[in-house]
Image: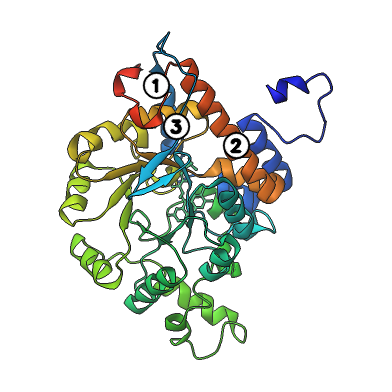
């Protein structure tokens, strides 16, 4: 209502409200390389489209006369209470998006009480992000290196600097076929971006003949050799359990059988995700497979989801289908590109206000009590 009250004389410098406009501002501000690095997906971008289509296909059937005076958006995750059902998805190399980079987006999260998931591929080391966030909630996302000493070292550092869970991204044992990036010859890592955690890691530095400052090219070449690990199997999860006492959450689960294997391995949660359509082009939309995964393991582990969350109603749909909370990716990065920390906070606030209103209008008082019967899937 505050917004409507000022509508008589809209401020031309006001930040956007419409999701698509945030993306337009990002497009104006960024060169082709960074813009398509964020906005693009793998191959023909069929999965990126499928993510959005999956949300469109689910229609809400609102309920009436249910007293929605008080609406509760809070959730419990891994035994902790959070005010809102969203988390910032881990996103690497944010220095190419805005000069404030990860520090800006992490501070926006801290202001909101929204958990921040720091990427292994952050531009700045995880210690700097932790320092900027104070006591605010944060998790660490692990890209599982071919070099076990680096993996162990990352886990140690995260534990030491107040990250309260480890998100292990399984869908990226190597870089995907991303046509925009290949066309633009744009891989930010090759320009030394997104290596903040590696170039400050004792286990990484021990393998170099010269420091990254003295010989950046050799350091980057070494990074390309150790970044991913195509040799991992389900047995490898034991290594993580031996090296950290933090909760372990597996990101990138799409097959119900994999969800069952995750539960067998005793992990603390899973994130149903196709990496925002950036890995396997043609993979199923994340929301489309969520009900199958909830049916397979919903009572045995915590299920989060991402890939395609754009508006408040999307959060509601994912939660009605059984997600405990959702991760938001690109929308926050368009906010970062447009206005740094302020932009990220504004996008979060808008999305949550939209969620709150949509909940009330659909006759729902608590995000934790949403049920699948609230939705109908249109074919
Ligand atoms: C990502 N994502 C990602 N995931 C991860 O585990 N580690 C990472 O470093 C990155 N980096 C990254 C960069 C960029 C530019 C994007 C857009 C995405 C994937 C991310 O965490 C999340 O799964 C998706 O962004 C969710 O999809 P939406 O919300 O962007 O549709």
Left or right of 33: which side holds 302? left
- Measure the alpha-carbon separation of dots 3 and 2: 13 Å
339 or 6, nearer to the observer:
6
Q: Which residue is mark 2?
A: 349
Location of residue 303 (image quadrant): top left
Q: Residue at x 59, y 70 (%)?
A: 192
Q: Which residue is mark 3?
A: 315
Of labels 3 and 2, the one closer to you: 2
184 or 103, nearer to the observer:
103
Of labels 1 and 3, the one closer to you: 3
Q: Residues within 10 Å of mark 2 (few under 14, many from 20)?
A: few
Residue farthest left in this picture: 264
Quadrant of image for the N terminus: top right
Residue farthest bottom in this picture: 209
Q: Residue at x 35, y 53 (%)?
A: 171
Q: Residue at x 33, y 56 (%)?
A: 170
Q: Are marks 2 and 1 in contact (CB under 8 Å)?
A: no
Q: Is residue 350 above or below residue 360?
A: below
124 or 369, nearer to the observer:
369
Residue farthest top in this picture: 65
- Measure the alpha-carbon separation of dots 1 and 3: 14 Å
Q: Which residue is mark 1?
A: 57
| Mark closer to the chain start, 2 or 1 | 1
| Mark closer to the chain start, 1 or 3 | 1
Q: Secondary structure at mark 3?
A: helix
- Measure the alpha-carbon separation of dots 2 and 1: 25 Å
Q: Are marks 3 and 2 in contact (CB under 8 Å)?
A: no
Looking at the image, can residue 16 be seen? yes
**Percent of width and height locating residue 50:** 41, 32
Location of residue 13 (image quadrant): top right
């Amino acid at each position: 209502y505050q917004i409507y009250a000022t509508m008589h004389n809209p401020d031309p410098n006001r930040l956007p409200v419409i999701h698509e406009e945030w993306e337009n501002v990002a497009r104006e501000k960024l060169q082709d390389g960074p813009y398509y690095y964020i906005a693009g997906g793998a191959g023909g971008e069929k999965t990126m489209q499928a993510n959005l289509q999956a949300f469109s296909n689910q229609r809400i059937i609102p309920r009436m006369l249910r007293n929605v005076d008080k609406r509760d958006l809070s959730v419990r995750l891994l035994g902790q209470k959070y005010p809102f059902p969203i988390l910032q998805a881990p996103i690497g190399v944010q220095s190419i998006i805005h000069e404030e980079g990860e520090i800006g987006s992490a501070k926006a999260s801290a202001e909101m009480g929204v958990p921040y998931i720091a990427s292994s591929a952050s531009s700045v080391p995880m210690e700097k992000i932790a320092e900027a966030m104070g006591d605010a909630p944060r998790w660490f996302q692990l890209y599982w290196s071919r070099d076990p000493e680096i993996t162990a070292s990352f886990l140690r550092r995260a534990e030491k600097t107040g990250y309260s869970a480890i998100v292990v991204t399984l869908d990226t044992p190597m870089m995907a076929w991303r046509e925009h990036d290949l066309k633009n010859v744009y891989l930010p890592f090759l320009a030394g971006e997104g290596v903040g955690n590696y170039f400050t890691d004792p286990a990484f530095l021990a393998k170099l003949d010269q420091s990254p400052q003295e010989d950046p090219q050799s350091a980057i070449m070494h990074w390309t050799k150790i970044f991913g690990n195509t040799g991992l199997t389900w047995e490898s999860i034991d290594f993580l359990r031996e090296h950290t006492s933090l909760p372990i959450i597996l990101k990138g689960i799409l097959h119900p059988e994999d969800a069952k294997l995750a539960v067998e391995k005793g992990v603390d949660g899973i994130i149903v995700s196709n990496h925002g359509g950036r890995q396997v082009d043609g993979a199923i939309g994340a929301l489309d497979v969520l009900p199958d995964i909830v049916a397979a393991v919903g009572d045995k582990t915590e299920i989060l989801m991402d890939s395609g969350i754009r508006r408040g109603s999307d959060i509601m749909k994912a939660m009605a289908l059984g997600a405990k909370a959702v991760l938001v990716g690109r929308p926050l990065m368009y906010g970062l590109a447009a206005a740094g920390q302020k932009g990220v906070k504004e996008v979060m606030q808008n999305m949550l206000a939209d969620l709150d209103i949509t909940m009330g209008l659909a006759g729902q008082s608590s995000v934790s009590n949403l049920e699948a019967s609230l939705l109908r899937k249109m074919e």
